[in-house]
Amino acid sequence: MRSDRNPPPFPERPVSRRSLLLGALVGGAAVGAVSLSRGSLPAIGEVPAAGGLFDPDLNGQHPRIILGTRVSLTELQRRAAAPAYAGFVSTMLGYATARAALPTITGAGNDAQWQTVYWGLPELAMSYLITGDSAYATKVRAWTLYVADPANFPDWGGESGGSMSNAVGLIAVAVAYDWCFELFSESERTMIRNKLALQADRLIAQFSNTSVATEAYWKNDPQPNHRHFRIDGVVTAAAAIHGDGADDSRESDDYRLEFGRSQLRQVLSWISPDGSQHESITYATYGNEHLVRAVDVLESVGGGDLWADPEIPGMGSFKVDVSLPRNVGQFAYGDTDGSLYYFNPYLWHIASKYQDGELQEFLQRLYQSGPAGVSSFYYNAWNLLWHDDSLVAAGLDDRPTTRLYPDLGVLASRSTWGDDGVSLHHKAGVMGGVRLNEWRDRLGPNTRYINVGHDHPDGGHYSVSFGGAIFGAYAPYGAYLTKQTNSVVAGADLGQAGERASGFTQPYTDMRGRASIPAVSALGADMVSVADVSGLYAAPSTSGITRCRRTIAFVDRQAAIVLDDVVASSARDIHSLFHSKGTASAVTGGSDIAQTVGSSTVTARYLQSSPDSGATFTSGAGLLPELGTTWRTTVPTATSARIATALVPQRSAADAATLTSAASGSQFSADLTRPNRVDTVAIATSSDGYGALSAAGASGNARALLIRSEGSTPVPTTLTAVDATFVEFVGARVEVVGTRRNLRLTSDGTSLTVQVDAVVPGATPAADLVLGNLAPGPFSVTVDGTLRDYYTVSASGRITVALEPSAPHTLVYTLP
């Protein structure tokens, strides 16, 4: 079954940057913080109760679709003259002036042609409203009457009325009819609203018609972006004509509006609770604007408050976190072009609704980042309605620098929120995400069709961005092979379930629970994550891989050390792949990758290592031209592989790095060595991923250890233990009582600072700690800034420090 009809569209002409007078990210609170959407593990939200359907006071009143209700005409005129909206107004008027006398539509029209109508009519209508210019009025009338005349277009688009063409046509014509009501005669209004009613009825009839397989790609589950288009079309058209006396072509005004609202409620109940979207961040932006507009339209006409929390505010959070430093693009996954994309105005409204100053500041920085930033807010009529210039843009610099989105399995981490930041993004989730698979399982486990046509078999993929460059290329739109991502493959590059050489990926049995990121530590300056994507290689994959765990240490949130622990059912070649654009030059143990950004050269060093016999390290032309160079670390003819790689920004001589690795028993470790510094990562390669670890003067039981050693003769100074029961470091011992937690120990030679936090965001942050290897006698420790000087250490050399479990804690005491 086909999942989609077209790749995402692009505006038909370039835009130039305009000034917009808008409102400055890292703070101490941000460093070490790790969270999910809005700081806590999101539960499944509840869509607010529907309430009334249509405000009877709006009968006969126009405009009513957002304008004239939530945003008054007086407020619109204020905004049109306000400095904060000047860039929007200037760009919009330029577009409206350049619009042709009539849109070009052949036959019933295709999606691209009708999207021109969808872009153009709100733009023309808004331009007329804020200027009164008759030239815009003429175009509004001409466009609307042309497309609404059944003699010209008996139907809008194909698919028996179920097309995206019809959906966007409904939105565009409904807006023109409502906002510019007085421009049309009564006979013209009758024709327009009857056409809107007919097209809405045709679209409604197609929601449950799955008899034509190639037209059912948006009808089978709540999450495809195309379903969101259709809901918006029904809601906006129904709200525009409600009570105006349209001929009842089978359905009533109330039925149309209630149908759209019930569809919207169902979708909002089943989208991702953390704001992520499985098709790609491109398609998230593409579809989310329609959900937000439908919610806004319903609220503006009395259809109730459907602002689903945490789902809708999570959309804004996810957009912020997957964006790259300097706003050069977005983390690539799924069917995406990696750009900022053009459909972002709806995010202003989310910021305003939730008074989210961080999101507001992000959007302002995005808009001001250059021509690509300006064009990412392409729909300027909606900027005028959704941007709230009274909301103070603030707090982005203090936003947590690491966030986990567990529904999709996306981890976002960065050094700062400034242009000089370094970001790392990592994906390790199931196709469709957790929530969509829950919906599938509820209706028909394993067999129910869900649309994962835009998902890629990309578990484990990661990339790093800094200085305006992106290191770690991703498969282009329509490429569905694991080898085209920065992941692990086996044999003849066989990868994960869901691979397909062409066309759209289809769902398979048991997609649930195959991958996750079960542990993340962002204590202090470092981030360490452990991902397990083993299940993605099970049938229908024929790779033979039975275990694939990837640990990433994002050291100082600058350099990435990546350790892969792979097991196969029988001997075969095991490969860890990395693709990147740029000019590659050989260095000891790897390559320097240089990219030109403006007049600057941005360089990262990619290093490869493995302790396994016969391991080879190669690089060459990319598997696809879009991927640049492909680096391949191969362990040949093996049932297991331990592969270490690293990506290190090269900005000074202090960044010159080498990588070595070693294995012993159920431990795999790697040393990233730079002048006066060594960072050691050790992981457990046992079947369950836990075990006794010992490296660089530290030991413990954990999933992973990260040890920093400093000086010309390196001395251990910092230890991060992920998912640990105990650690020993610089002569001290710290135990977690009865459970596992993330720990970070920092020594200055005389005192020890101990931090404790949850293994994953949203879990219980703390537990009681036992401090060991202490000298008997009186003992004091400072807990979260408060001195506790009442302890006495017995001959066992141990004390138990009771901690409130609901929050992370910091302890400081003198080393024995």
Image: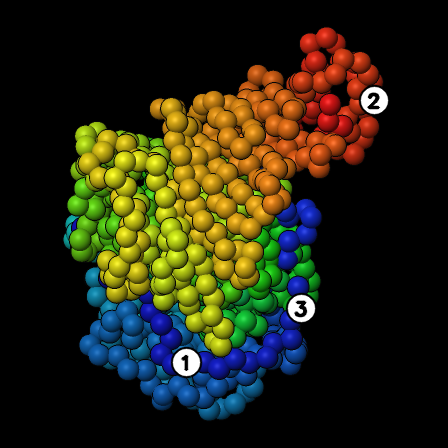
- The type of residue carrying mark 3 is Gly
Q: Residues within 10 Å of mark 1 (few under 14, many from 20)?
A: few
Sequence-wise, the earlier of marks 2 and 1 is 1
Marks 2 and 3 sit apart, C-alpha to C-alpha, by 48 Å
Q: Is residue 211 visible in this depiction of the protein?
A: yes
Q: Which mark is residue 14?
A: 1
| Amino acid at dot 1 | Pro
Q: Determine which residue is flagged by label 2.
A: 789
Which tag is nearer the camera, tag 2 or tag 1? 2
| Point 29% across, 72% down: residue | 112
> In the image, what residue occupies the spot 24% across and 31% down?
639
Separation of marks 2 and 1 at Cα, in angstroms: 67 Å
Depth-wise, is mark 2 or mark 3 nearer the camera? 2
Q: How is the image coloured?
A: rainbow
Does 556 appear above or below 722? below
Q: What is the distance, in whole Å, between disc 3 and disc 1 at their CAs?
A: 26 Å
Counting residues from the start of the chain, the first of labels 2 and 3 encountered is 3
Q: Is residue 262 left or right of residue 798?
A: left
Residue on which disc 3 sits: 23
- The residue positioned 31% from the left and 78% from the top of the image is 147
Q: Residues within 10 Å of mark 2 (few under 14, many from 20)?
A: few
Q: Classify 10 Å Cα crowding around label 3: few (below 14), some (14-19), many (20 and above).
A: some
Instruction: Tell me, yes or no, whether the two marked residues, 3 and 1, touch with CB atoms within 8 Å.
Output: no
Query: 126 or 274: which is nearer to us?
Result: 274
Per the image, label 1 sits on a secondary structure element best described as loop
x then y, percent, for residue 161? 25, 62
Examine the image and state in which quarter residue 615 appears. Answer: top left
Label 3 vs 1, first from the N-terminus: 1
Along the horizontal axis of the image, is 437 left or right of 52? left
